[in-house]
Amino acid sequence: MEAAATTLHPVVFFDGVCGLCNGFVDRLMRWDRHRVLRYATLQGRTAQERLPADHTEELNSIVFFDGERLLTRSTAALHIIMKLGGAWKLAGIFLLLPHFIRDGVYNWIARNRYQWFGKHDTCRLPSPEERALFLP
């Protein structure tokens, strides 16, 4: 069942102790009315089993598996938002910006995210309503 959920739905892998990352996931769950996305922490079993080690050792990027490609950094964030459909697809306009500019901003935020948004002692636990959206 978990394997099917991973292959049928795009998966957002995020730093489970990062306040910014958790806030982003909270917003995505609110905006994702069709429940397209699934979520897994980079510290969790799904990430350990399915991602290259460099993505789970250094927790400096959100990772998005869209069913075909593994995307990171600003490209991942934009594709995640676009996956919500509707007006959210307009976020794709930012893909026209050069990669080094988008990732430069992304890296600056990533370096400072714990200081600005906090770092939790443990990964977030999904509520009973959210549990079906999270992979182990």
Image (spheres, helix red, strand yellow):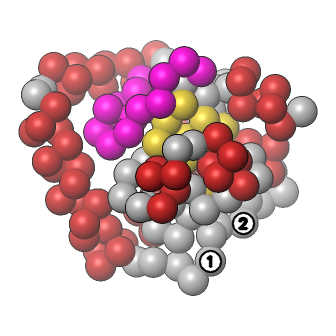
Give SS at disc 1: loop
37 and 49: which one is in front? 49
- On the image, the x and y values in percent for residue 90 come to 31, 19
Q: Is residue 27 above or below residue 121?
A: above
23 and 18: which one is in front? 18
54 relative to 128 in the view: left or right: left
Answer few, some or many: residues within 10 Å of disc 2's Cα (few below 14, many 20 plus, some between 14 and 19): few
Whether residue 33 is visible, yes or no, is no
Q: Nearer the viewer, mark 1 or mark 2?
A: 1
Q: Residue at x 12, y 37 (%)?
A: 100
Magenta stretch: dominant secondary structure: helix
Q: Name the residue beneath numbered marker 1.
A: 122
Q: CA distance from mark 1 to mark 2?
A: 9 Å
Q: Quadrant of the N terminus?
A: top right
* Residue sitting at the far bottom: 121
22 relative to 6 in the view: left or right: left
- On the image, the x and y values in percent for residue 112 come to 25, 70
Give SS at disc 2: loop
Q: Residue at x 48, y 61 (%)?
A: 57
* Residue sitting at the far front: 53
Q: Is residue 96 magenta?
A: no
Snapshot quadrant of residue 126: bottom right
Q: Residue at x 44, y 52 (%)?
A: 54
Q: Name the residue beneath numbered marker 2.
A: 125
Residues at badges 1 and 2 in contact (C-beta under 8 Å)? yes
Q: Residue at x 10, y 39 (%)?
A: 101
**Amino acid at the residue labelled 2:** Leu
**Amino acid at the residue labelled 1:** Thr
- On the image, the x and y values in percent for residue 33 come to 63, 30
Q: Which residues are magenta?
A: 67-83
